[in-house]
Amino acid sequence: MGKIEAVGHIWQDQNGKRERHRIALDQFEGKWAVIYRILGAIVRAVLVVMLITTPSVLLPNVSADGAQIVALVALFGAALTFFEYVSAYPGLVEFRDAPPFNRVRFGSLFLTVLLLTLIFRGTTEPTIATDFVTSVGALIGYVLDFPYSPVRLMLLALPEGASLSEIEMMREAAGLSYLISLVALSVFVIILRLGHWPSKSGSFNVWINLPTFDPTAGGDVIARLKRDARINIVIGFLLPFLIPAVIQSASNLFGGLSVTNDQSLIWTVTAWAFLPSSLFMRGIAMERVASMIAEKRRQTYAKADFDHQLV
Protein backbone atom coordinates (compact mmCIF):
# COMPACT_ATOMS: atom_id res chain seq x y z
CA MET A 1 0.00 0.00 0.00
CA GLY A 2 2.82 2.38 0.82
CA LYS A 3 4.37 1.88 -2.59
CA ILE A 4 1.01 2.43 -4.29
CA GLU A 5 0.47 5.67 -2.36
CA ALA A 6 4.01 6.82 -3.22
CA VAL A 7 3.41 6.14 -6.91
CA GLY A 8 0.13 8.06 -6.68
CA HIS A 9 1.86 11.04 -5.10
CA ILE A 10 4.54 11.01 -7.80
CA TRP A 11 1.87 10.86 -10.53
CA GLN A 12 0.00 13.79 -8.95
CA ASP A 13 3.23 15.79 -8.66
CA GLN A 14 4.02 15.17 -12.31
CA ASN A 15 0.52 16.18 -13.37
CA GLY A 16 0.77 19.29 -11.23
CA LYS A 17 4.10 20.21 -12.77
CA ARG A 18 2.69 19.72 -16.29
CA GLU A 19 -0.33 21.87 -15.45
CA ARG A 20 1.85 24.63 -14.01
CA HIS A 21 4.10 24.42 -17.07
CA ARG A 22 1.08 24.71 -19.38
CA ILE A 23 -0.25 27.73 -17.48
CA ALA A 24 3.18 29.41 -17.56
CA LEU A 25 3.48 28.70 -21.29
CA ASP A 26 0.02 30.18 -21.95
CA GLN A 27 0.92 33.28 -19.96
CA PHE A 28 4.21 33.61 -21.87
CA GLU A 29 2.44 33.29 -25.23
CA GLY A 30 -0.19 35.78 -24.09
CA LYS A 31 2.50 38.34 -23.22
CA TRP A 32 4.16 37.91 -26.61
CA ALA A 33 0.78 38.29 -28.33
CA VAL A 34 0.28 41.61 -26.56
CA ILE A 35 3.79 42.75 -27.54
CA TYR A 36 3.19 41.81 -31.18
CA ARG A 37 -0.13 43.65 -31.15
CA ILE A 38 1.51 46.80 -29.74
CA LEU A 39 4.36 46.65 -32.27
CA GLY A 40 1.88 46.13 -35.10
CA ALA A 41 -0.17 49.11 -33.94
CA ILE A 42 2.97 51.29 -33.81
CA VAL A 43 4.03 50.27 -37.33
CA ARG A 44 0.56 51.00 -38.69
CA ALA A 45 0.49 54.39 -36.97
CA VAL A 46 3.85 55.29 -38.51
CA LEU A 47 2.61 54.27 -41.95
CA VAL A 48 -0.45 56.49 -41.54
CA VAL A 49 1.80 59.42 -40.64
CA MET A 50 3.91 58.76 -43.73
CA LEU A 51 0.80 58.63 -45.90
CA ILE A 52 -0.65 61.91 -44.66
CA THR A 53 2.62 63.85 -44.67
CA THR A 54 3.95 62.63 -48.04
CA PRO A 55 2.56 65.52 -50.14
CA SER A 56 3.66 68.23 -47.72
CA VAL A 57 7.14 66.70 -47.38
CA LEU A 58 7.83 66.14 -51.09
CA LEU A 59 6.11 69.16 -52.59
CA PRO A 60 8.06 72.44 -52.67
CA ASN A 61 6.76 75.77 -51.44
CA VAL A 62 4.53 74.38 -48.69
CA SER A 63 3.49 77.11 -46.25
CA ALA A 64 4.25 76.83 -42.55
CA ASP A 65 0.56 76.99 -41.64
CA GLY A 66 -0.25 74.23 -44.11
CA ALA A 67 2.53 72.05 -42.73
CA GLN A 68 1.23 72.52 -39.18
CA ILE A 69 -2.29 71.52 -40.20
CA VAL A 70 -0.96 68.42 -41.95
CA ALA A 71 1.09 67.53 -38.86
CA LEU A 72 -1.99 67.78 -36.63
CA VAL A 73 -4.04 65.63 -38.99
CA ALA A 74 -1.20 63.09 -39.16
CA LEU A 75 -0.97 62.89 -35.36
CA PHE A 76 -4.72 62.44 -35.08
CA GLY A 77 -4.70 59.70 -37.72
CA ALA A 78 -1.77 57.96 -36.04
CA ALA A 79 -3.46 58.04 -32.63
CA LEU A 80 -6.71 56.72 -34.06
CA THR A 81 -4.90 53.91 -35.87
CA PHE A 82 -2.78 52.99 -32.84
CA PHE A 83 -5.69 52.75 -30.40
CA GLU A 84 -7.77 50.87 -32.96
CA TYR A 85 -5.17 48.14 -33.52
CA VAL A 86 -3.73 47.95 -30.01
CA SER A 87 -7.14 47.15 -28.59
CA ALA A 88 -8.28 43.55 -28.40
CA TYR A 89 -11.88 44.62 -29.00
CA PRO A 90 -13.33 45.87 -32.30
CA GLY A 91 -13.74 49.54 -33.05
CA LEU A 92 -14.26 51.09 -36.47
CA VAL A 93 -11.80 49.35 -38.81
CA GLU A 94 -13.43 46.49 -40.71
CA PHE A 95 -11.72 43.19 -41.57
CA ARG A 96 -9.03 43.90 -39.00
CA ASP A 97 -8.15 40.22 -38.57
CA ALA A 98 -8.68 39.25 -42.21
CA PRO A 99 -5.51 40.21 -44.08
CA PRO A 100 -4.66 41.30 -46.70
CA PHE A 101 -7.89 43.26 -47.22
CA ASN A 102 -6.76 46.42 -45.45
CA ARG A 103 -3.18 45.99 -46.66
CA VAL A 104 -4.27 46.04 -50.29
CA ARG A 105 -6.41 49.11 -49.69
CA PHE A 106 -3.71 50.98 -47.81
CA GLY A 107 -1.08 50.00 -50.36
CA SER A 108 -3.15 51.35 -53.23
CA LEU A 109 -3.90 54.54 -51.30
CA PHE A 110 -0.26 55.15 -50.39
CA LEU A 111 0.94 54.40 -53.92
CA THR A 112 -1.63 56.78 -55.40
CA VAL A 113 -0.66 59.64 -53.08
CA LEU A 114 3.06 59.05 -53.67
CA LEU A 115 2.86 58.92 -57.47
CA LEU A 116 0.54 61.93 -57.73
CA THR A 117 2.91 63.86 -55.48
CA LEU A 118 5.79 63.00 -57.81
CA ILE A 119 3.78 64.22 -60.81
CA PHE A 120 3.08 67.58 -59.19
CA ARG A 121 6.63 67.87 -57.88
CA GLY A 122 7.94 67.39 -61.41
CA THR A 123 6.37 70.65 -62.57
CA THR A 124 8.85 72.68 -60.51
CA GLU A 125 11.66 70.26 -59.61
CA PRO A 126 11.86 67.63 -62.38
CA THR A 127 13.93 64.50 -61.85
CA ILE A 128 14.24 61.17 -63.60
CA ALA A 129 11.64 59.66 -61.26
CA THR A 130 9.13 62.49 -61.73
CA ASP A 131 9.59 62.47 -65.51
CA PHE A 132 9.05 58.71 -65.65
CA VAL A 133 5.90 58.82 -63.51
CA THR A 134 4.57 61.77 -65.52
CA SER A 135 5.16 59.95 -68.81
CA VAL A 136 3.39 56.83 -67.56
CA GLY A 137 0.50 58.93 -66.25
CA ALA A 138 0.21 60.78 -69.56
CA LEU A 139 0.07 57.51 -71.51
CA ILE A 140 -2.55 55.99 -69.23
CA GLY A 141 -4.53 59.23 -69.16
CA TYR A 142 -4.75 59.38 -72.94
CA VAL A 143 -5.87 55.74 -73.10
CA LEU A 144 -8.61 56.26 -70.50
CA ASP A 145 -9.69 59.67 -71.78
CA PHE A 146 -12.66 58.90 -74.01
CA PRO A 147 -16.22 60.30 -74.05
CA TYR A 148 -18.20 59.71 -70.83
CA SER A 149 -15.27 57.98 -69.14
CA PRO A 150 -14.50 58.85 -65.50
CA VAL A 151 -11.24 60.48 -66.58
CA ARG A 152 -13.04 62.68 -69.12
CA LEU A 153 -15.60 63.68 -66.46
CA MET A 154 -12.80 64.71 -64.10
CA LEU A 155 -11.36 66.91 -66.85
CA LEU A 156 -14.76 68.51 -67.33
CA ALA A 157 -14.85 69.28 -63.59
CA LEU A 158 -11.93 71.71 -63.99
CA PRO A 159 -12.70 75.45 -64.08
CA GLU A 160 -13.48 76.94 -67.48
CA GLY A 161 -10.30 79.02 -67.43
CA ALA A 162 -7.98 76.07 -66.85
CA SER A 163 -4.86 76.17 -69.00
CA LEU A 164 -3.68 73.39 -71.28
CA SER A 165 -0.91 72.41 -68.86
CA GLU A 166 -3.41 72.13 -65.99
CA ILE A 167 -5.68 69.95 -68.13
CA GLU A 168 -2.73 67.73 -69.03
CA MET A 169 -1.74 67.42 -65.38
CA MET A 170 -5.28 66.48 -64.37
CA ARG A 171 -5.41 63.86 -67.13
CA GLU A 172 -2.13 62.35 -65.95
CA ALA A 173 -3.19 62.30 -62.30
CA ALA A 174 -6.69 60.97 -62.97
CA GLY A 175 -5.53 58.26 -65.37
CA LEU A 176 -2.76 57.01 -63.09
CA SER A 177 -4.88 57.01 -59.93
CA TYR A 178 -7.77 55.27 -61.68
CA LEU A 179 -5.45 52.56 -63.01
CA ILE A 180 -4.02 51.98 -59.53
CA SER A 181 -7.52 51.54 -58.12
CA LEU A 182 -8.39 49.01 -60.84
CA VAL A 183 -5.16 47.09 -60.24
CA ALA A 184 -5.79 47.00 -56.47
CA LEU A 185 -9.30 45.69 -57.07
CA SER A 186 -7.97 43.02 -59.41
CA VAL A 187 -5.29 41.98 -56.91
CA PHE A 188 -7.89 41.56 -54.17
CA VAL A 189 -10.13 39.46 -56.44
CA ILE A 190 -7.17 37.22 -57.32
CA ILE A 191 -6.30 36.82 -53.63
CA LEU A 192 -9.94 36.05 -52.92
CA ARG A 193 -10.01 33.28 -55.52
CA LEU A 194 -6.57 31.75 -55.00
CA GLY A 195 -5.99 32.32 -51.28
CA HIS A 196 -9.40 31.25 -49.93
CA TRP A 197 -9.87 34.62 -48.24
CA PRO A 198 -10.71 35.46 -45.47
CA SER A 199 -9.69 32.16 -43.86
CA LYS A 200 -8.47 28.86 -45.23
CA SER A 201 -10.01 27.11 -42.22
CA GLY A 202 -13.41 28.61 -42.94
CA SER A 203 -13.65 30.43 -39.59
CA PHE A 204 -14.57 34.11 -39.52
CA ASN A 205 -15.35 36.31 -36.52
CA VAL A 206 -18.10 38.69 -37.63
CA TRP A 207 -17.92 40.73 -34.42
CA ILE A 208 -14.18 41.45 -34.80
CA ASN A 209 -14.07 41.97 -38.55
CA LEU A 210 -17.41 43.74 -39.04
CA PRO A 211 -17.78 45.87 -35.89
CA THR A 212 -20.40 48.15 -37.47
CA PHE A 213 -22.57 45.21 -38.55
CA ASP A 214 -25.04 43.98 -35.92
CA PRO A 215 -26.06 40.36 -36.57
CA THR A 216 -28.88 40.65 -34.01
CA ALA A 217 -30.49 43.72 -35.58
CA GLY A 218 -33.20 41.60 -37.18
CA GLY A 219 -33.69 39.65 -40.36
CA ASP A 220 -31.58 36.94 -41.87
CA VAL A 221 -27.85 37.67 -41.58
CA ILE A 222 -27.05 36.25 -45.01
CA ALA A 223 -29.73 38.33 -46.74
CA ARG A 224 -28.56 41.50 -44.98
CA LEU A 225 -24.92 40.87 -45.87
CA LYS A 226 -25.78 40.26 -49.52
CA ARG A 227 -27.96 43.38 -49.61
CA ASP A 228 -25.16 45.51 -48.14
CA ALA A 229 -22.70 43.93 -50.59
CA ARG A 230 -24.85 44.87 -53.58
CA ILE A 231 -25.31 48.42 -52.29
CA ASN A 232 -21.55 48.87 -51.86
CA ILE A 233 -20.83 47.50 -55.34
CA VAL A 234 -23.43 49.74 -56.98
CA ILE A 235 -22.18 52.84 -55.16
CA GLY A 236 -18.58 51.92 -55.98
CA PHE A 237 -19.49 51.65 -59.64
CA LEU A 238 -21.34 54.99 -59.73
CA LEU A 239 -18.99 57.13 -57.63
CA PRO A 240 -16.36 57.77 -60.37
CA PHE A 241 -19.16 59.31 -62.43
CA LEU A 242 -20.99 61.05 -59.59
CA ILE A 243 -18.03 62.77 -57.90
CA PRO A 244 -17.13 64.94 -60.94
CA ALA A 245 -20.81 65.87 -61.29
CA VAL A 246 -20.93 66.87 -57.62
CA ILE A 247 -17.76 68.94 -58.05
CA GLN A 248 -19.27 70.72 -61.04
CA SER A 249 -22.51 71.40 -59.18
CA ALA A 250 -20.66 72.66 -56.11
CA SER A 251 -18.49 74.95 -58.22
CA ASN A 252 -21.46 77.27 -58.69
CA LEU A 253 -21.67 77.78 -54.93
CA PHE A 254 -18.13 77.28 -53.61
CA GLY A 255 -16.00 77.87 -56.68
CA GLY A 256 -14.42 75.40 -59.06
CA LEU A 257 -11.82 72.77 -58.36
CA SER A 258 -8.62 74.53 -57.33
CA VAL A 259 -5.78 73.83 -59.74
CA THR A 260 -3.30 76.06 -57.93
CA ASN A 261 -3.26 74.14 -54.63
CA ASP A 262 -1.35 70.96 -55.36
CA GLN A 263 -2.13 69.25 -52.06
CA SER A 264 -5.90 69.71 -52.31
CA LEU A 265 -5.84 68.49 -55.91
CA ILE A 266 -3.82 65.41 -54.93
CA TRP A 267 -6.24 64.44 -52.18
CA THR A 268 -9.29 65.16 -54.35
CA VAL A 269 -8.09 62.93 -57.19
CA THR A 270 -6.98 60.27 -54.70
CA ALA A 271 -10.39 60.21 -53.03
CA TRP A 272 -12.11 60.10 -56.42
CA ALA A 273 -10.17 56.94 -57.37
CA PHE A 274 -9.79 55.26 -53.97
CA LEU A 275 -13.33 55.47 -52.54
CA PRO A 276 -15.05 53.60 -55.39
CA SER A 277 -12.40 50.88 -55.38
CA SER A 278 -12.64 50.56 -51.60
CA LEU A 279 -16.44 50.24 -51.71
CA PHE A 280 -16.17 47.68 -54.50
CA MET A 281 -13.75 45.62 -52.42
CA ARG A 282 -15.97 45.92 -49.35
CA GLY A 283 -18.97 44.70 -51.32
CA ILE A 284 -17.04 41.73 -52.72
CA ALA A 285 -15.74 40.90 -49.23
CA MET A 286 -19.22 41.02 -47.66
CA GLU A 287 -20.57 38.80 -50.44
CA ARG A 288 -17.78 36.34 -49.66
CA VAL A 289 -18.61 36.37 -45.94
CA ALA A 290 -22.28 35.77 -46.73
CA SER A 291 -21.33 32.79 -48.89
CA MET A 292 -19.16 31.38 -46.07
CA ILE A 293 -21.99 31.69 -43.54
CA ALA A 294 -24.42 30.05 -45.97
CA GLU A 295 -21.99 27.16 -46.54
CA LYS A 296 -21.51 26.68 -42.79
CA ARG A 297 -25.28 26.71 -42.33
CA ARG A 298 -25.73 24.03 -45.02
CA GLN A 299 -23.06 21.86 -43.41
CA THR A 300 -24.70 22.22 -40.00
CA TYR A 301 -28.13 21.29 -41.35
CA ALA A 302 -26.70 18.33 -43.26
CA LYS A 303 -24.91 17.05 -40.15
CA ALA A 304 -28.07 17.46 -38.07
CA ASP A 305 -30.10 15.49 -40.64
CA PHE A 306 -27.45 12.74 -40.72
CA ASP A 307 -27.40 12.46 -36.91
CA HIS A 308 -31.20 12.36 -36.86
CA GLN A 309 -31.23 9.49 -39.36
CA LEU A 310 -28.75 7.54 -37.23
CA VAL A 311 -30.99 7.93 -34.19
Image: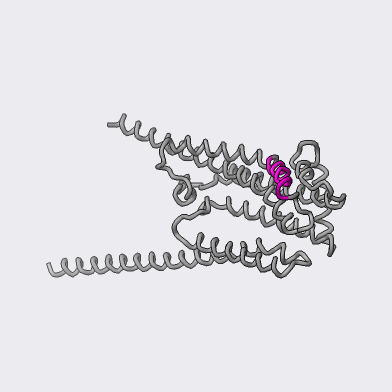
Q: Which residue lies furthest to the front in this view?
A: 253
Q: Measuring from the top left, give residue 175's x and y in whole percent.
A: 77, 47
* Residue 287 falls left or right of residue 278: left
Q: How many labels sit on residues?
A: 0
Residue located at (38% from left, 64% from top): 26
Look at the magenta stretch and give its main secondary structure.
helix
**Depth check: 282 or 256 in front?**
256
Q: In which quarter of the image is the N terminus?
A: bottom left
Q: Measuring from the top left, give residue 146's x and y in whole percent.
A: 80, 38
**Depth check: 5 or 207 in front?**
207
Q: In which quarter of the image is the C terminus?
A: top left
* Residue 304 falls left or right of residue 147: left
**Depth check: 80 or 250 in front?**
250
- Quarter of the image for residue 62 reads bottom right
Q: Residue furthest top?
A: 309
Q: Is residue 111 in sight in this rendering?
A: yes
Residue located at (62% from left, 51% from top): 105
Q: Measuring from the top left, give residue 155's x and y in whole percent.
A: 79, 45
Residue located at (79% from left, 43% from top): 156
Q: Measuring from the top left, give residue 46's x and y in whole percent.
A: 60, 66
Is residue 16 shown above or below 271?
A: below
In the image, residue 134 lies in the stretch drawn in magenta: no
* Residue 30 falls left or right of residue 271: left
Residue located at (54% from left, 61% from top): 80
* Residue 169 falls left or right of residue 105: right
User: Range of the magenta residues?
Assistant: 242-254
